[in-house]
Image (cartoon, rainbow, N blue to C red):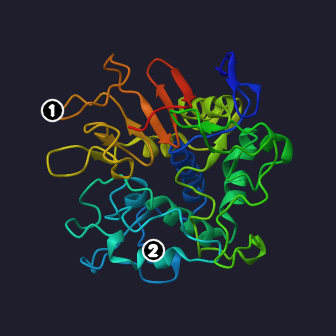
């Protein structure tokens, strides 16, 4: 179903928020990226299990495990052995993702690729880099072509591809003290929606495919409305079809869901380091390709926020005072999409 309009007021913009107003949805952005990836997999542009070095055009290896190839499946399921310790979103417009990957702090030296789950935002700028290299298209425009436009969702990654009318309805993100922290744009499209270059300019004509996949924040920068998020949920409930539009094969949806990893002592971390150890330990216990399965009946798992034991699938988001979720019960044919701002960290 579409989301309900609630009487919610945006303090900074001094207006009522509606279910068609776009919000920075945080890590649910990763799930939408994965849908785009599976479209490229179905088109034989990408392969989940190939050595990604072949697509990148240069050799990428974990310094401590140089004989272990890294695959797209590992990136999407957070089993690549990458970490967020070297950063992932601060790369300037004229910078390179490779400079971050060359930093030893970007790697988990204790675990070989494919052997350990560690929720890492850096995986998704690398995924975006692969998508750009495989197609020659800029990531935000590619996502518009592969996913957003076919579904009729007026949305974008980091505002650049959104029109002025959509950007004017941006939902401002607040911290717990009601201070605006993101998208307080005064009802206008930002003059620059990406990181400035090292020279301080915002000249996107300098973009080249496969150099800086972090530019449009694939890990968290999707601006999407509650109704748009609900349509993504209907796509997953419909085995790749929503509102008469077939986007994925049912087998691709099953691949997204997995799970590719299920928690057992010693095989992964159950919380996100970039949030200071939050969500609470035990939140991640089953994970596919940017899709989590809830309510894992296993010691050490506390991944049942609904408290009813139902194995819903989807993704959560948490950043800049926003908490969000897209969760579907495929057996019952129901789901929920939500976001809230002004939330405390953790």
- Note whether residue 45 is visible: no
Q: How many marks?
A: 2
Q: Nearer the viewer, residue 279 or 178?
A: 178
Q: Is residue 33 left or right of residue 59?
A: right
Q: Nearer the viewer, residue 329 or 3?
A: 3
Q: Which residue is mark 1?
A: 299
Residue 335 image point, x, y percent: 52, 23
Q: Which residue is mark 2?
A: 100
At 41% across and 27% down in the image, what residue appears? 312
At 28% across and 74% down in the image, what residue appears? 68
Residue 144 image point, x, y percent: 72, 52
Q: Residues within 10 Å of mark 1 (few under 14, many from 20)?
A: few
**Numbered disc in front, either 2 or 1:** 2
Q: Quadrant of residue 173?
A: top right
Q: Quadrant of the C terminus?
A: top left
Q: Nearer the viewer, residue 223 or 248?
A: 223
Q: Residues within 10 Å of mark 2 (few under 14, many from 20)?
A: some
């Amino acid at each position: 179903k579409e989301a309900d309009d609630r009487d919610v007021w945006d303090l900074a913009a001094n207006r009522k928020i509606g279910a068609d107003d776009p919000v920075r949805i945080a890590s649910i952005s990763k799930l939408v990226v994965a849908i785009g990836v599976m479209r490229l997999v179905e088109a034989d542009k990408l392969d989940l299990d190939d050595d990604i070095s072949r697509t990148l055009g240069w050799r990428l290896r974990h310094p401590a495990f140089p004989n272990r190839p890294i695959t797209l499946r590992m990136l999407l399921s957070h089993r690549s052995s990458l970490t967020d310790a070297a950063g992932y979103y601060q790369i300037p417009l004229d910078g390179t993702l490779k400079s971050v990957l060359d930093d030893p702090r970007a790697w988990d030296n204790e675990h070989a690729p494919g052997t350990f789950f560690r929720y890492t935002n850096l995986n998704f700028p690398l995924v975006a880099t692969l998508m750009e290299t495989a197609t020659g298209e800029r990531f935000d425009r590619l996502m518009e072509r592969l996913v957003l436009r076919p579904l009729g969702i007026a949305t974008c990654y980091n505002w650049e591809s959104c029109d002025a009318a959509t950007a004017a309805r941006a939902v401002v993100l607040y911290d717990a003290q009601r201070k605006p922290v993101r998208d307080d744009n005064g009802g206008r499209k930002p003059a620059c929606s990406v990181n400035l270059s090292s020279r301080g300019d915002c000249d996107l004509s300098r973009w080249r495919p496969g150099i800086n996949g972090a530019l449009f924040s694939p890990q968290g920068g999707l601006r999407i409305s509650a109704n748009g998020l609900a349509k993504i949920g209907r796509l997953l409930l419909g085995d790749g079809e929503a509102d008469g539009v077939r986007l994925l094969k049912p087998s691709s949806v099953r691949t997204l869901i997995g799970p590719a990893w299920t928690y057992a002592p010693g095989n992964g971390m159950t919380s996100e380091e970039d949030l200071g150890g939050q969500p609470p330990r035990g939140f991640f216990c089953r994970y596919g390709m940017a899709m989590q399965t809830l309510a894992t009946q296993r010691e050490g798992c506390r991944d049942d926020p609904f408290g009813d034991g139902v194995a819903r699938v989807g993704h959560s988001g948490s950043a800049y005072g926003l908490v969000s979720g897209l969760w579907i019960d495929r057996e019952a044919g129901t789901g929920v999409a939500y976001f809230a701002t002004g939330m405390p960290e953790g």
